[in-house]
Image (spheres, coloured by chain):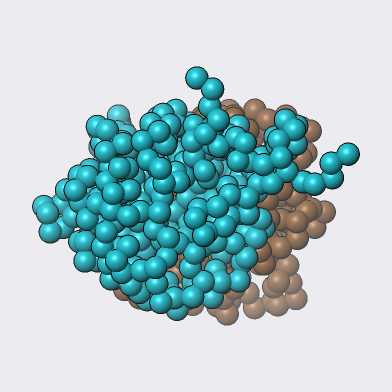
């Protein structure tokens, strides 16, 4: 489906913590065709500083035309966006990129770190709706963050679907005290055939990719890079790929915006 | 009442553009990437991503960095190579109903000649734009675009190998851009396009490392517009071939400034990333500007700066 550019009305601006914002926008033409793992590019301002759009994974998409993004204030663009008011319009392009792919494996693990949790909610809802009536599947959700305030506001959204959620925090304020990747061995029976869907900081994804490879699990990761265009015109978001990457060209780089942002972990050259 | 629409068309010799709004190389892919957002048929022309004889893999990431009202890029001229360009990209481009300028780049004078020869035989191409901001491998890596003698030699070589109109895209990273512009004219160029990006740099103060994988990169966007405008004005006075203005053009007003300074057409670059519909908005804006000012043709704007 082709992406569109539209003016999306801000319907809700929720402050989930001191620096985490969830924006809900009316963007029917995007909501109608979006898949979990895809992203949108949003202009923080109609002025030219900051200049470029910011990429955000789709956090939730609802049948009534609403899309949501979830982000932490990390710079000028996100600071401006965190302050938009209900009724304002944002210039949004999307949905962009390739999302998560369905797997025939019945044991599914969603592993998110920090703001990487964002796209996993959309994915979880999609998986739950797809697998309804299928009693053989099993979903485990592992969420990690620096501290409890980054996870607590999102917990209900996962648990309301009846999902089994395990938590890890760097400071031990909630759940397991340590890395969320440690939860893999604690919660996943290595004898089962798992598919891991993961999004989060690069070092976390690298670790998830390694553990998945060692256990012969499938693993799909959603990667983040700086992007200028989001539509593979500028070629700015180059990602070194492993030799197993099967794209139509013979280049050593994939482009996160169009070849991703979701990649099979085995296709990425982890640095 | 005059019902005739004010005319936006401009001509470069035998080459006719329905309006003076084009896209800048490297910011518009091979056209198809923007087809969801822009009616390509409404543009005066599109300039595709620079093409070399062999595919190029480009630079290691990070390749882009945002700066004040601008961006740095060090993509490293990643492209599919001329053969794949012709076999995979041209079919779409042949059918979009606007002029297709193919931007070419090489490591040697001979490379440029071979590219021109290959493209000359390919139907659907309106013109060649020559990127001379690349290092000349055979001359110790000095950029072609900084040496007027090399600019003239490359221009002459490309002209001798093709019958298409040839535009030389000038580098601003020189002391006097009118010298390279005149060298291009001397070599037989049908026009010059300027400016390419300004060499720049950004540093991450926490890690104390350069932000770009290539350390340095090209600055583009609104930040460079005044520099570009000044150079276009200087060059337009010095050459009698058409000048295409490039550099931070984002709005209709920006485009009009370049036309007034002497550009016969403009290329929109970084603005395509900010607003994928920027080019079409400028086409509409120019039409309105002419009508609001009771002008019958865009030619009444080109070079009409009042000093």
Give the percent coordinates (x, y) of residue A38: 59, 58
Location of residue B39 by image quarter: bottom right
User: Which quadrant is the N terminus of chain A positioned in?
Assistant: bottom right
- A176 relative to A215, above or below: above
Q: Does residue A161 appear in this view?
A: yes
Give the percent coordinates (x, y) of residue A156: 68, 47
- A256 relative to B113, above or below: above
- Identify by letter the chain in cyan: B
At 26% across and 62% down in the image, what residue appears?
A: B157
User: Along the horizontal axis of the image, is A137 left or right of A9?
Assistant: left
Of the pair A171 and B144, the residue shown nearer to us: B144
User: Along the horizontal axis of the image, is B25 left or right of B22?
Assistant: left
At 62% across and 59% down in the image, what residue appears?
A: B40
Q: Does residue B56 appear in this view?
A: no
User: Which quadrant is the C terminus of chain A positioned in?
Assistant: bottom left
Give the percent coordinates (x, y) of residue B238: 36, 36
At 25% across and 50% down in the image, what residue appears?
A: B151
- A138 relative to A124, above or below: below
Give the percent coordinates (x, y) of residue A191: 44, 77
Of the pair A190 and A149, the residue shown nearer to us: A149
Of the pair A174 and B269, the residue shown nearer to us: B269
At 22% across and 56% down in the image, what residue appears?
A: B153
User: Along the horizontal axis of the image, is B148 left or right of A247?
Assistant: left
- Identify by letter the chain in brown: A
């Amino acid at each position: 489906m082709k992406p569109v550019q539209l003016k999306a009305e801000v319907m809700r601006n929720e402050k989930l913590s001191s620096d985490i914002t969830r924006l809900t926008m009316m963007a029917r033409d995007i909501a109608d065709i979006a898949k979990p793992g895809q992203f949108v590019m949003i202009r923080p301002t109609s002025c030219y500083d900051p200049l470029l759009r910011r990429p955000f994974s789709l956090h939730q998409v609802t049948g009534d035309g609403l899309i949501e993004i979830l982000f932490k204030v990390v710079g000028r663009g996100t600071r401006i966006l965190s302050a938009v008011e209900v009724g304002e319009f944002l210039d949004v392009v999307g949905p962009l990129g390739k999302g998560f792919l369905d797997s025939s494996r019945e044991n599914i693990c969603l592993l998110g770190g920090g703001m990487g949790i964002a796209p996993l909610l959309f994915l979880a809802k999609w998986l739950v709706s797809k697998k309804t009536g299928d009693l053989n599947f099993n979903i485990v959700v592992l969420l990690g963050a620096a501290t409890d305030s980054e996870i607590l506001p999102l917990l209900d959204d996962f648990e309301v679907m009846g999902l089994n959620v395990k938590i890890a925090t760097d400071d031990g304020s909630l759940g397991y005290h340590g890395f969320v990747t440690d939860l893999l061995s604690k919660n996943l029976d290595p004898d089962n055939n798992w598919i891991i869907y993961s999004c989060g900081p690069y070092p976390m994804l690298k670790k998830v990719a390694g553990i998945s490879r060692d256990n012969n699990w499938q693993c799909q990761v959603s990667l983040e890079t700086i992007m200028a265009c989001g539509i593979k015109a500028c070629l700015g978001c180059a990602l070194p790929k492993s030799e197993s990457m099967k794209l139509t060209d013979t280049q050593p780089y994939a482009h996160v915006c169009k070849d991703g942002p979701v990649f099979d972990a085995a296709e990425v050259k982890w640095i | 009442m005059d019902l005739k629409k004010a005319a936006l068309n401009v001509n470069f010799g035998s080459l006719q553009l329905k309006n003076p709004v084009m896209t800048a190389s490297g910011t518009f892919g091979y056209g198809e990437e923007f087809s969801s957002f822009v009616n390509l048929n409404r543009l005066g022309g599109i300039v595709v991503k620079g093409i070399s004889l062999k595919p190029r893999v480009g630079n290691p990431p990070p390749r882009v960095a945002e700066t004040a009202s601008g961006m740095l890029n060090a993509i490293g001229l990643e492209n599919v190579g001329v053969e794949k360009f012709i076999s995979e990209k041209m079919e779409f481009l042949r059918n979009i109903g606007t002029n297709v300028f193919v931007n070419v780049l090489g490591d040697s004078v001979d490379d440029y000649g071979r590219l021109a020869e290959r493209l000359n035989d390919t139907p659907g191409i309106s013109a060649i734009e020559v990127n001379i901001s690349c290092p000349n491998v055979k001359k110790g890596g000095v950029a072609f675009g900084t040496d007027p003698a090399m600019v003239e030699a490359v221009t002459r070589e490309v002209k001798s190998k093709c019958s298409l109109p040839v535009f030389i895209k000038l580098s601003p990273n020189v002391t006097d851009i009118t010298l390279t512009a005149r060298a291009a004219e001397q070599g037989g160029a049908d026009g010059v396009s300027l400016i390419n990006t300004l060499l720049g740099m950004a540093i991450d103060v926490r890690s104390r490392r350069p932000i770009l994988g290539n350390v340095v990169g090209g600055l583009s966007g609104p930040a460079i517009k005044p520099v570009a405008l000044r150079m276009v004005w200087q060059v337009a006075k010095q050459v009698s071939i058409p000048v295409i203005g490039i550099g931070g053009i984002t709005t209709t007003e920006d485009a009009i400034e370049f036309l007034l300074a002497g550009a016969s057409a403009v290329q929109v670059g970084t603005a395509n990333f900010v607003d994928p519909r920027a080019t079409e908005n400028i086409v509409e804006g120019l039409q309105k500007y002419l009508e609001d000012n009771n002008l019958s043709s865009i030619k009444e704007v080109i070079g009409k700066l009042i000093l």
